[in-house]
Amino acid sequence: MPKFAANLSTMFNEHDFPDRIDAAGACGFAAAECQFPYATPAEVVRRRLDAAGLELVLLNAPAGDFTAGDRGLGSVEGRDDEFQASIETAGRYAEVVGCPRVHVMAGCPSDSGASNRFVDRIGWAADRLAPAGIDVLIEPMNLRDVPGYLLMSSRQAERVIAAVGRANVKLQFDTYHLQIQEGDLLESFRRCLPVIGHVQFSSLPGRHEPDEGEVDHPWLFEQIDASGYAGWIGCEYRPRAGTVEGLAWAEPYGIGRPDTR
């Protein structure tokens, strides 16, 4: 059966961040992911995860100044020191909370050397995080939502992973971004399976629950499960209404309202 991780950045926003951990556990989630948890001390998050019986399976490295247009530092010229500091921050946080995966965003570069720079920096990050048993994930994003983003297809990500040449560098396969960019999700998933470290989803359009839109996510979940993929599937969607009210899609997987499971 597929394993789902609640995204604490997009779900359970009815609560303050630490309380989202308890809410996810009460709904039957055994794992969670998040984007940028750094405003909450790692020790606090670890205590709350342990109390709720959850594990944190993915977090993002700091990605620069979003208000200034940053969407990651991985390939952006002149940001070497900031990039390395972001990996140090993410590594320390991940070690405390027991998170085995860090997503490193590529950014929106403006020069021709960005691809080689990204390979070099991802290699540096992989070497820094490997002793702690942490994987580095890279994720293609769609250019409609993130114009200028360096990494824009699954095949490009495969080439980066091959060029980096580290066993702990893997692909974050997001159905929302890849459906917009290239479609043919199942074929892409099967081709990329050897390098996939994590899966995420949301409906398209809207980025909501997986019970609507142009992708038949319940069918896709069955195919992913049948492929032998044993990792987590992150629920990186924005609930249409309340988070708990929108969990009817998850009831077949043992997740849902606390009073209906």
Image (tube, helix red, strand yellow):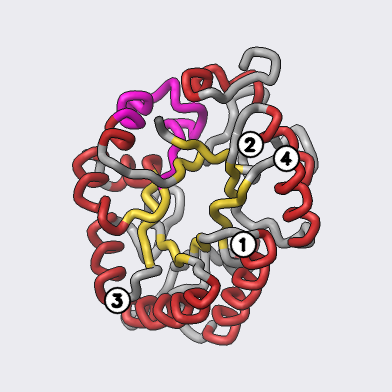
Is residue 55 among what the camera can see?
yes
Q: Counting other residues with Cα less than 10 Å from the Cα at mark 3, is it few (<14), some (14-19), or many (20 or more)?
A: some
- The residue where tag 1 is placed is 66
Q: Which mark is residue 152?
A: none
- Does residue 170 lie above or below 225 as drawn? below
Queried whether the magenta region covers residue 210, the answer comes back as yes
Q: Which residue is mark 4?
A: 52
Q: Judge depth for marks 3 and 4 and give the one in front.
A: 4
Nearer the viewer's eye, disc 1 or disc 2? 2
Amino acid type, mark 1 = Phe
Q: Which mark is residue 165?
A: 3
Q: Amino acid at mark 3?
A: Gly
Marks 3,1: beta carbons within 8 A: no
Mark seen at residue 11: 2
Q: Is residue 228 above or below residue 153?
A: above
Please tell me in which quadrant of the rendered image residue 229 appears: top left
Q: Residue visible at 50% across and 36% down?
A: 4
Q: Which residues are magenta?
A: 199-222
Q: Give the mark, 3 or 1, whose residue is nearer the N terminus.
A: 1
Nearer to me, 192 or 114:
192
